[in-house]
Image (cartoon, rainbow, N blue to C red):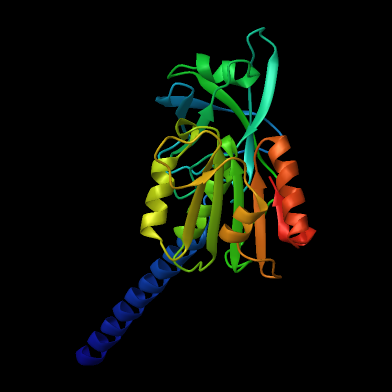
Amino acid sequence: MEFLQGQRLETTVAVAVAVVAVAAGAAYLFLRSRKPRGCLDPENFREFKLVEKRQLSHNVAKFKFALPTPTSVLGLPIGQHISCRGQDAAGEEVIKPYTPTTLDSDLGHFELVIKMYPQGRMSHHFREMKVGDYMSVKGPKGRFKYQPGQVRAFGMIAGGSGITPMFQVTRAILENPEDNTKVHLIYANVTYDDILLKEELDSMARNYPDRFKIYYVLNQPPEIWDGGVGFVSKEMIQAHCPAPAADIQVLRCGPPPMNKAMAAHLDELGYTKEMQFQF
């Protein structure tokens, strides 16, 4: 009798342990599968504190903003942007779109690399910002939606600060080991010093030589220069972007005159409207 009672007790304990293990496993899988809720609001501006401002050149700085907790995510889909609100030199409200260079894998903060122009209205606001100040941000914004593997390859043509959405998309592709999409980037600027994120771009080209290629173009290159010279031409696009095909897409982002010229080049080279996207 005592032997049977002992057996029943052992069975009960074993079942209880198994139930706890299954519950713990289910809870772990549930928590792991849950996407963290983003901090953005598409309808209302939210305030984010500037915790670091690092000057990269005479007119370019990197701004790091804290999210509510160290594990918070911004919640910005790949290839989309945010609206930032500030004041110009006359004290009037100004709102301008920017693309963070960080991803949701960068927990607790987001970063903006900003080129500040002498007469830029929002540039004035960023120039005046000090650590501890708050930025009003709303989003996500944008028409671009990226899913891993949606194309075989991207061609990208960027000018100046138009590199930021390209950088964001490229980072997301290269840092995903299950994404085999190839990226071919043409990046145009006036001078060598105007090139934004060059260290990061060169690092990605070294680390992912089979998946990421970059070709720099300068209007006023230094004496020793092995990149392109002048404006981005049809010949450069032919040499450094994937040829027209149903499974490729060419993204472009730059000043309006450049975007217009690139659209004309792509049309003449046989890229259909479906193969092109302008940020």
Report the residue at 52% width, 58% height from top.
34
Q: Front-most of 96 and 105?
A: 96
Q: Which residue appears farthest toward the front when viewing the image?
A: 223
Toward which corner of the image does residue 29 lie, by quadrant?
bottom left
Q: Relative to 23, does residue 274 appear above or below in the rendering? A: above
Toward which corner of the image does residue 235 lie, by quadrant?
bottom right
Q: Front-most of 139 and 56?
A: 56
Of the 4 image quadrants, the one containing the C terminus is top right
Q: Position of residue 241 (x, y in %)?
A: 60, 59
Number of labelled discs?
0
Left-right relation of 154 to 56: right
Report the residue at 45% width, 39% height from top.
197
Report the residue at 37% width, 50% height from top.
203
Q: Position of residue 178 (x, y in %)?
A: 48, 69
Left-right relation of 259 to 68: right
Of the 4 image quadrants, the one containing the N terminus is bottom left
Q: Position of residue 213 (x, y in %)?
A: 48, 57
Q: Relative to 15, does residue 96 appear above or below in the rendering? A: above
Q: Is residue 77 something one can see in this rendering?
A: no
Q: Is residue 61 something one can see in this rendering?
A: yes
Q: Which residue appears farthest toward the top when viewing the image?
A: 90
